[in-house]
Image (cartoon, helix red, strand yellow):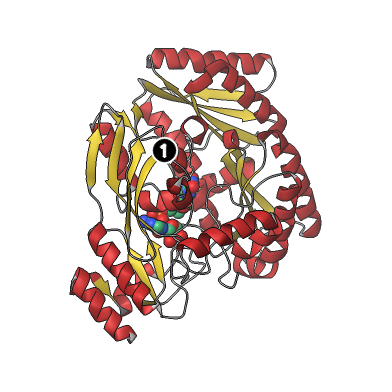
Amino acid sequence: MTPLNLIETLIGIVGPSHVLTGDDADSYEQDWRRRGRGKALCVVRPGSTDQVARVVKACSEHGVAIVPQGGNTGLVGGSIPDGSGTQVLLSLRRMIAVRAIDPQNMTMTVEAGCVLQSLQEAADQAGFLLPLSLGAEGSCTIGGNLATNAGGTQVLRYGNARDLCLGLEVVTPQGDVWEGLSGLRKDNTGYDLRDLFVGSEGTLGVITSATLKLYPKPAAQLTAWAALASLEDANRLLGLAHRRAGASLTGFELMNRFSLELVDKHYPHLRVPMWREHAWCVLIEISDAESELHARGLLEQLLENAFEEGLVADAIVAENLKQVHDLWHIRESITLAQTEEGFNVKHDISVPVSRIPEFVRQADAALSAALPGVRFVTFGHLGDGNLHYNIQAPAGSDAPTFVTAHEAAISTLVYDLVSQHAGSISAEHGVGELKRHKLPQHKSAVALNLMRAIKSAIDPLNTMNPGRVLESST
Ligand SMILES: Cc1cc2nc3c(=O)[nH]c(=O)nc-3n(C[C@H](O)[C@H](O)[C@H](O)COP(=O)(O)OP(=O)(O)OC[C@H]3O[C@@H](n4cnc5c(N)ncnc54)[C@H](O)[C@@H]3O)c2cc1C
């Protein structure tokens, strides 16, 4: 069979307007960071699980590889095809049905192509909270979120995408449908297949639908912004916030001075508070089951105690919902502000919260010694021990040239230090294409062998997103 035969078969399954080639495929072939571009045999856009199954079966019969894609906001190059022009890019973006909401079970069952924000809105309209929230929520899909086990800003309280998923429907690499859309919170009937597919980055199958946990909507969400002198103080404040707020603490975000300086420089209208005078700022979010008054009392008491203990140099509590959104908007603009400044070397790492100050001190010192003048865009989800530790070229130097010349050495240094601090080289973005060659140095041989055994048992022909997460040859 030739590629043309396969394209004809795919057209027969999804219709001619949903098999794209040439310029029509262009936007699917470019990754979000503009670090990579692939070339697909074609883009296929099925509209139902049955169509996904038939597409996957046809590709499997032709021995043709498939790259699943949701919103294409992934940051590790796993959602675009390679450059061979032989892979089929399977876009889930037409599968956007909310199949069911079960208010008593507090679950919603949705199709993989639903954009995260639309699901937050659907949950809200039904009187619930879907507590998965990330900067890309207006574009990323729930299928992509589950395939990457996305994190975001509320992991501290509600967990990551894995923790919010009760069941999955998956098309296997052979084109069979595993209907595992359980709404059960307890089910100990053997190996957890759901947990295998969550975080598998399209290498084990195509997620077509999921049953997600919903939560009661909090009566109020309130945010404070505080300035601190050191990371040790940030950690102590985090501990205090855990003790004072308990389960009401839903977010604790950290930002260094330079990350806020970039927001101020590129988006001056956002009016970033306190960044000039202080080395670190944190954003604290409280979700309160009682009332805004109660939330305000809690936050004010927390900050008062923090001032007494000398942890906080300055602080504000948002006056109203607009200010809450404005403060979050500043935090979420860091990602784009650093892009405006030019390419940088990104790391999405985690270490135990207790080791963050030492990690940052050692990494900053080693990199400043090796590359004088480098600038540190350090921010992230301190409450989860997850930092985006990004290295910007020295002021005035050419960013792309700097990245090309130094990326490999910088990342080796950072990841070695992460391992020394018992951390992970990918906290929430996944492995994809960009980090797969790093895994053998940072995961044990036993763990890697188990991962390879799982991959070859489920996808023996290696047609599901080959070469991502694990090297193809392994
Ligand atoms: C501005 C910005 C902010 C971000 N903030 C965060 C953050 O705070 N936390 C975080 O975790 N991530 C963050 N990300 C990264 C990204 O948004 C997440 O990884 C997201 O979960 C990807 O979803 P997607 O639908 O875009 O997936 P894609 O990018 O399309 O795909 C990602 C991976 O999942 C696979 N995949 C996609 N859909 C499926 C499916 N249905 N079945 C099987 N495999 C599939 C792909 O093959 C690929 O390997 C951010 C990205 C941007 C651009």
Q: Is residue 300 above or below residue 57?
A: above
In the image, 315 versus 181, the foreground residue is 181
In which quadrant of the rendered image does the N terminus lie? Answer: bottom left
Name the spot of residue 127 as percent of width and height, x first: 26, 28
Identified at 74% across, 54% down, the residue is: 416
Name the spot of residue 304 as percent of width and height, x first: 59, 14
Residue 291 seen in this snapshot: yes
In the image, 42 versus 373, the foreground residue is 42
Q: Is residue 437 above or below residue 326?
A: below
Residue 135 seen in this snapshot: no
Name the spot of residue 169 as percent of width and height, x first: 33, 50
User: Where on the image, by quarter, is ligand 1?
Assistant: bottom left
Q: Is residue 46 left or right of residue 400?
A: left
Q: Amino acid at mark 1?
A: Leu
Q: Is residue 213 above or below residue 339?
A: above
> Mark 1 sits on what residue?
164
Q: Is residue 193 left or right of residue 371?
A: left
In the image, 73 versus 214, the foreground residue is 214
Identified at 33% across, 68% down, the residue is: 56
Identified at 61% across, 26% down, the residue is: 238
Q: What secondary structure is marked by label 1?
A: helix
